[in-house]
Amino acid sequence: MKGKNKVVKILLGLFVSLLSLVIVLLLVLQIGMAVAHTWKPWRPDYEKADLTKILSSETLSSSDYELLYRQTGLTKIGVDGLIEAGRTEDIYAVQEDFFAGYTMYEDLFGPFTCAEKLYAADTVHFAALEDGDVIVTPTTHFSFVRFGHSILVVDGEDGVFLNAFGYGSFSGLTNSTSHFADRPAFMILRPKAEKSVREAVAAYAADELVGIEYSIFAGVFGGRFDENEPPDVTQCSHVIWYAFKHFGIDIDANGGAMVFPQDIANSSEFELVQVYGIDPDRLWEY
């Protein structure tokens, strides 16, 4: 009898210890959520300038492009792209977005996992997109871990994107920018590769990398890349990395076991097109 009571006490002690551990873990995660919610997007602390004179000029100087970058978050690539597309007026809208103080809300889409978003009426304007462009955002986090999100532009003209969103979903194509136009911070990146290569990457992704099950641990077990067969599981940044790797381009800045949106944001294989809600001097640095 004494032996049985001793076993019961041991089991009860183990149960209490396990329960305590779970409670502490949940408390830490909840505190982490509170810490993450203190994050705020970058907004200019200087005055908005009148761009009329600059944008009415036939040619732009390097100082004009620098001013436009500080006023809109558009680099020379972004400015020229909108002008060439006959969308010069959109530059004024981008400037309005750049300075606006929009209200965010937390979109909880998983346990201790959420994204900061803007209300529907506050969606922001994009630069002219091209096939192969990548959009990254820091506005997704698990507790206090801010891992972000990323999508690949597979058709810039029609606005089609490859997206691997989260658990319970599969990589797929969407014709909506809603995953990013309502984010309070993002970066649009353009590969430095030739246009033909960028288009080939986009076409390959649209044809071969759709319908893959989501897993945050994609590439950790069994290797990240097989040139003969697409992966069985993937996640938002891994599927983009895989598409470029298929053409011999490694967009993982630190070459770690896993690839995250911030790794793509720091890759030397890209040029910046537009930044919004992120310090234009520091960008999304490590």
Image (spheres, helix red, strand yellow):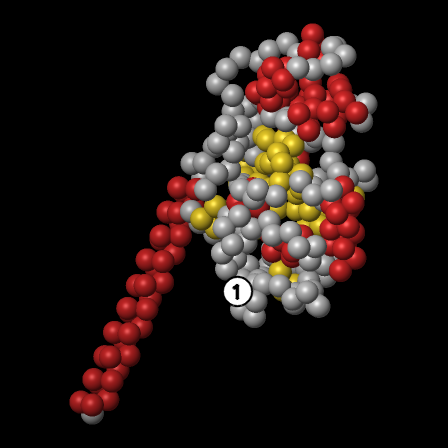
For residue 148, say whether it is visible. Answer: no
Residue 196 lies left or right of residue 63; in this view the side is right
What residue does disc 1 label? 220
Q: Quadrant of residue 156?
A: top right
Total marks shown come to 1
Q: Secondary structure at mark 1?
A: loop
Q: Nearer the viewer, residue 221 or 96?
A: 221
Q: Residue at x 28, y 79 (%)?
A: 11
Q: Nearer the viewer, residue 14 or 75?
A: 75
Rendered location of residue 286, percent (x, y): 45, 42
Rendered location of residue 96, percent (x, y): 63, 20
For residue 2, say whether it is visible. Answer: yes
The vertical placement of 223 against 204, above or below, is below
Rendered location of residue 174, percent (x, y): 75, 48
The vertical placement of 143 against 188, above or below, is below
Q: Residue at x 52, y 24 (%)?
A: 43
Q: Residue at x 50, y 15 (%)?
A: 46
Q: Amino acid at mark 1?
A: Val
Rendered location of residue 18, percent (x, y): 32, 69
Find the residue positioned furthest to the bottom: 1
Residue 198 lies left or right of residue 15; in this view the side is right
Quadrant in which the N terminus is drawn: bottom left
